[in-house]
Image (cartoon, rainbow, N blue to C red):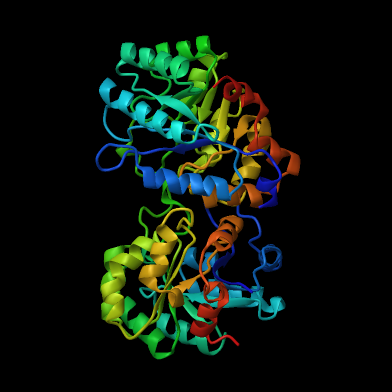
Amino acid sequence: MDLFKNNTVINWHDHVWPDENNKLDEKRLYLMMKSFHDTYMDLIVCSNPVLRGNPTPEEFIHCNNLQYEAITKYPKEMKGMVFVNPGYMKESLNEIDRCVNELGFIGVKLYNQYHISSPVVRDIIEKCIRMDIPILEHAAKLNHGAALQPYTSNGLHFAKVAEQYPEGVFIHAHIGGGGDWQWTLKAIEDFSNIFIDISGSVCDEDIIEQSVSHLGAKRILFGTDMSFSASIGKMLGADIKETEKIEILNNKAFEKYIMRG
Amino acid sequence: MIIDVNTYLGHWPFRKINHNESHSLSAYLKKSQIDQACVSSLNAIFYKDTQQGNLELAEEIKGEGDFFIPFAVINPTYAGWEKDFIYCISTLKMKGLMLYPYYHGYKLTDDCAVSLINLAAKMNVPVHLPCAIENIRQKHPMDTEENLSLSQVSEVLSLCSDADFIISNGSTHAMAKSLKNIIDQRNGEVFFDFARVEVFTEDLDQLIDYAGIDHVVFGSVAPFQYIDPQLVKLNYLKTDDLDKIKYKNLSRLLRIK
């Protein structure tokens, strides 16, 4: 664990969750933050998305309030991403304003309610560009079980929107999140404003090496997405340069977002 | 010391795999503190006649001393399976049986599978059931649509109550919980690896609670997966009996001195 102990580690992808009473799941938060401290991380960026269905403004505002509650418990260790549903555009834009300007959130989290290249999402992308904040979007090239998440974005959706908005900053979530990661790397490699995080439970040998080979370490962020051992182990086991590992663990291109939050 | 229950040699048709030759794999595993590894043939899964893959494996690992502990891949729907299995155990000195019902098109509860498992039990050979090889969400269009079926495992544990089983590379914490009542009523033992179980939540503790510390083993799924995620788990696992998980349980099952 010397790699983690001796270097700055920014975890760009994890979550807080509601409990069965729709309040902040404190036990789960405690376990995550204990793991965070035990593995020598310096900052964790979290969101609280609704995974199924079409959340209303009341629901996504509540999600962000829970996220903010978690931040108040760990103000030095945690930053937030605003979760919104682009199907409610006016409310989403207002919520981004509230969370970024009043609560100090540092980016937008979109889930699987719409493809990122859908025209429905455009106003959110344009707002993020104006505010200079990144968009972290749930993503995968699912070769099995795709019907369960028909609007999950894949690399081609990202490529389309990255070409359309070259000034946007798009993070393709969890390259190890369970999908054809080789397909994804080829789909996004030509678009320098698409980044990936390495999180997810899939720890296929070569996934980090191929990610660096296609994108370069500068376009890769460290993340866990509830899979600490897989994500940490991928970084420890990858056969890439130490300097590239350090760059991924603390991607300097994203430092400005943290400083502003 | 670590004994790894789940490694592979050979070709995987759907993705380029590194370290899939014996010398390269043994070096890769040794670099990660692994002292011995159960190994089976990937080729055998995809050859019509699995025995050709088993023979290749036996030849391939000859130069590696006792580092590799070979397991035989047998398809019980293929002609001559009984003779092949006995040859693998008696002549090639293989130590275990690998079954892939989701690649070979049978159910664990089919008569042929039950006969093979009961023969393995009679010969004191453990039966290894990997839940999957690769994560199914990234599957090639020609790869299987299924993982190991929990309901089939549940039934076969009762049908073949004398056999020892190893279940690997899946949500084994949930499986150990579901299967506990059945396992408690059997003569044979059931071992689980933790390749896809998280140590930083309560899942790995749950696996140990339900399976028992004497029935949890180390499996890396090398060379498909990085070994380090499993080493991280060993590093953070809170138990006084880590050696049981690292090697003692498998040494006992496979009668390794």
- Can you give x and y, in whole percent of width and height, for residue B254 in the image? 52, 83
In the image, taking residue A87 as reference, residue A96 lies left or right, namely: right
User: Above or below — where is B190 with respect to B194?
Assistant: below
In the image, taking residue A207 as reference, residue A155 lies left or right, namely: left
- Can you give x and y, in whole percent of width and height, for residue B17 in the image? 60, 54
Mark yes or no: residue B76 visible. yes
Q: Image point 44% across, 86% down: which residue?
A: B83
Given residues B15 and A120, the one toward you in this image is: A120
In the image, taking residue A59 as reference, residue A84 lies left or right, namely: right
* Quadrant assignment, res A50: top left
In the image, taking residue A226 as reference, residue A210 lies left or right, namely: right
Given residues B189 and B72, the one toward you in this image is: B189
Q: In which quarter of the image is the N terminus of chain B?
A: bottom right
User: Above or below — where is B110 with respect to A134?
Assistant: below
Q: Image point 29% across, 65% down: which residue?
A: B178
Mark yes or no: residue B140 visible. no
- Can you give x and y, in whole percent of width and height, for residue B149 in the image? 31, 62
User: Above or below — where is A18 with respect to A234?
Assistant: above
Given residues B159 and B91, the one toward you in this image is: B159
- Can you give x and y, in whole percent of width and height, for residue B180 in the image? 30, 72
Given residues A173 and B128, the one toward you in this image is: A173
Q: Quadrant of the C terminus of chain B?
A: bottom right
Figure disc tally: 0
Q: Image point 51% across, 84% down: which residue?
A: B252
